[in-house]
């Protein structure tokens, strides 16, 4: 393809767009043909920190009231999760929120079944620590800490969020996402068509979609985790 034709094609694709996707093999072939691409260097450490600093100020205002006096391990999980949110580590924050829920279920069930903090025998903690989340939810329900409705919500969360994020099931996370009105160019013919691309059919679309979904999910997931933990801590005080 003539360089001027190629540049005109790229200009057409760039109109109204802020993201471009290309097959790496195509890029290498174009380079061999003499096309030159401007490479934007990654942000410096100072630029990265400044960007994250501004986002952190905005996000700090959105944190919900936390439960009073969480025990030390729970408090440490809270702090780490909130730091991940502040610095834009959304996948880590979502995963940590799920860990916070799971630990809170195990801890409060242990205390409830022990008859309170004063009677808790730490030598028996291993039984609770070794539970998976499915068992922890059911055990908390049997102990009277959660009702059927909350148990269903927790099992749904475990299946739809916790497991896919813990095991990086990107196809499941982005299921149903469609990139609409994507300009697709054929470099052989020079033709451009506008298409809809389901994320399930394109790994690159999956990666882009998941980044946006992580941003959308992180606060709702943290709010859910905080509500569950607050509920559990209040129940063992009854």
Image: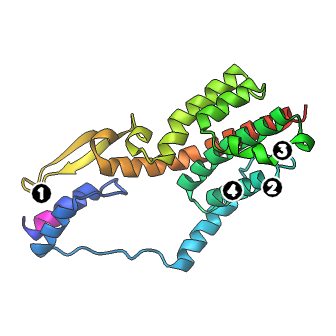
| Magenta segment main secondary structure | helix
Q: Magenta segment, which residues? A: 4-8
Q: Is residue 188 visible?
A: yes
Q: CA distance from mark 3 to mark 4?
A: 31 Å
Q: Is residue 219 visible?
A: no
Which mark is on residue 187? 1
Callout 1–callout 3 Cβ contact below 8 Å? no
* First in residue order: circle 4 vs circle 1: 4
- Residue tagged 3: 121
* First in residue order: circle 2 vs circle 3: 2
Give the image location of residue 141, x and y in percent: 71, 26
Q: Nearer the viewer, mark 4 or mark 1?
A: 4
* First in residue order: circle 3 vs circle 4: 4
- Residue tagged 4: 82
Residue at screen point 18% across, 59% down: 9
Give the image location of residue 122, x and y in percent: 80, 48
* First in residue order: circle 2 vs circle 1: 2
Query: Could you tell me which secondary element the residue under label 4 belongs to?
Result: helix
Give the image location of residue 151, x and y in percent: 66, 26
Residue 19 picture quarter: bottom left
Residue 28 belongs to magenta span: no
Which mark is on residue 72? 2
Q: Nearer the viewer, residue 51 or 192?
A: 51
What is the quadrant of the C terminus in the image? top right
Query: Could you tell me which secondary element the residue under label 3 belongs to?
Result: loop
Dot 1 surroundings within 10 Å: few (below 14), some, or many (20 or more)?
A: some
């Amino acid at each position: 393809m003539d360089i001027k034709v190629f540049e005109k094609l790229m200009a057409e694709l760039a109109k109204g767009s802020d993201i471009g996707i290309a097959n790496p093999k195509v890029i290498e072939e174009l380079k061999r043909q003499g096309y030159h691409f401007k490479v934007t260097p990654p942000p410096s450490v100072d630029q990265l920190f400044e960007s994250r600093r501004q986002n952190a100020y905005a996000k700090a205002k959105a944190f919900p009231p936390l439960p009073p006096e969480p025990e030390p391990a729970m408090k440490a999980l809270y702090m780490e999760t909130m730091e991940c949110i502040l610095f834009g580590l959304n996948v880590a924050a979502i995963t940590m929120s799920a860990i916070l829920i799971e630990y809170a279920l195990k801890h409060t069930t242990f205390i409830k079944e022990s008859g309170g903090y004063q009677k808790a025998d730490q030598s028996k903690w291993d039984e609770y620590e070794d539970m998976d989340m499915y068992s922890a939810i059911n055990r908390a329900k049997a102990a009277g800490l959660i009702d059927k409705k909350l148990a269903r919500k927790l099992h749904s969360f475990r299946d739809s969020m916790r497991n896919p994020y813990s095991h990086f099931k990107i196809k499941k996370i982005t299921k149903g996402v469609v990139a609409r009105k994507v300009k697709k160019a054929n470099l052989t013919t020079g033709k451009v068509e506008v298409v809809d691309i389901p994320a399930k059919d394109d790994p690159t679309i999956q990666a882009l979609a998941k980044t946006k979904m992580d941003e959308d999910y992180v606060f709702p997931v943290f709010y859910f985790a905080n509500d569950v933990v607050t509920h559990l801590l209040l129940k063992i005080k009854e």
